[in-house]
Image (cartoon, rainbow, N blue to C red):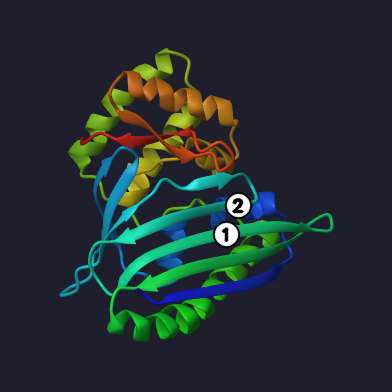
Amino acid sequence: MAKQFHYTWTWELVSPPEALWPLVSDTNRFNCDTGLPPMILLGIAKGVRRVKFKVPLVHVEWEEEPFEWVYPYRFGVLRRYKTGPLKEMRVDVRMERVGNSRTRLVYDVHVAGRNLLGDILIPLGIGFVSAKRFGTAFQKYDRLVSSGEQVFGTKGGGHLSTSSRDNLKKRIAPLTDSGVDRVILDRLLEFLNRADDISIQQIRPYTLADQWNLPRRAVLEAFLRATRIGILDMYWDVICPACQNVTDDVSALNEL
C-alpha cells in the first residue's frame, strides 16, 4: 500500500482574495515562479488532461482531473501519475477573508509515493523545498497586488513566427466588423503570441478579463465569436464542487 503524506501550510497576506485570485489561481505562472519544469500537454479526453514534465532523462507523466473552482476563494485538482516516483496528488487551495481586506491562504496537499524513492523524495521535495518556494511566490503576489503593479500573466517574448502572426491577424479581423472591441482583440493577440503552450491549451476568459481590467461578458463573447470562425476551440473543463457538474468554459487555440 502506498504511503500517504499530508501537508498544510498557511500564509497571512495583506491583500483581499479578489485581488489575489488572478495570480494565485494562475497555475502556469505559479509553476514557473516556484521552479517547476515546463509542462507539455499530451492530450485531453473527456475533460481529463494527460500532461508530462519537460525534464531531460526523467519521464514524469500524469492524468489531471478538471480543476474545481470557487471564485475567489478556492480551487483544487487531482493528479494521478502514470510514471515517476509519485502515485497520486490532491491539491486544495483556500483563501479565507480576514477582516475587510486581508487574506489567510491555506495550501493543503495529499500525496502518495509510488515506491521507496517517492517516499524519500516527498518529505524533502514537497515537505521542505516546495513549502519554502510556495510561500515566497504567494508573498511576492501579495506585494505585487498591494503595490498596484499591473501583471499580465505571461512571460517572455513572442513565440509566433511573422507568418503565423500575420495569419492570425487576418483571421481575427472579421471580429472587429461583428462588433468586438478592438482593445479585447489586441489583448487576445498579445496573449496568443506570448503565452506558453499549456496556457494556450487552457484559456480562462474570465481570468483574462480580470487581468486585463475589461468586462467579463465582453471578453467571453469575443472568445465565443472567435470559436465560430475557427480561431479557438471551446470545451468544458471546470467541475462545480457542490453538484459535480461541468459548469464553466475553456478555450483552446487551433493550430495556426
Residue that carries the numbered disc 1 in the rendered image: 93
Q: Give the left or right position of residue 154, taking residue 173 as reference.
A: right
Vertical side of 35 occupied by 179: above or below: above
Q: Residue furthest top?
A: 178
Circle 1: element type = strand
Circle 2: element type = strand
Q: Residue furthest right?
A: 99
Quadrant showing the N terminus: bottom left
Q: Position of residue 32 (x, y in %)?
A: 40, 65
- For badge 1, the amino acid type reads Val
Residue that carries the numbered disc 2 in the rendered image: 74
In this orientation, which residue lies closer to the viewer: 136 or 72? 72
The reply to whether discs 2 and 1 touch (Cβ–Cβ < 8 Å) is yes
User: For residue 185, which quarter of the picture?
Assistant: top left
The crowd level at tag 1 (other Cα within 10 Å; few <14, some 14-19, many 20+) is: many
In this orientation, which residue lies closer to the viewer: 225 or 93? 93
Can I make out residue 179 in this image?
A: yes
- For badge 2, the amino acid type reads Arg
Vertical side of 210 occupied by 39: above or below: below
Who's the residue at 42% across and 56% down the image? 78
Q: Give the left or right position of residue 28, taking residue 114 as reference.
A: right
Who's the residue at 46% across and 48% down the image? 67
State how far apart marks 2 and 1 are (Cα): 6 Å
Q: Position of residue 64 (x, y in %)?
A: 35, 52
Who's the residue at 49% across and 34% down the image? 245
Can I make out residue 158 in this image?
A: no
Q: Position of residue 198 (x, y in %)?
A: 33, 50
Q: Earlier in the sequence, mark 2 or mark 1?
A: 2
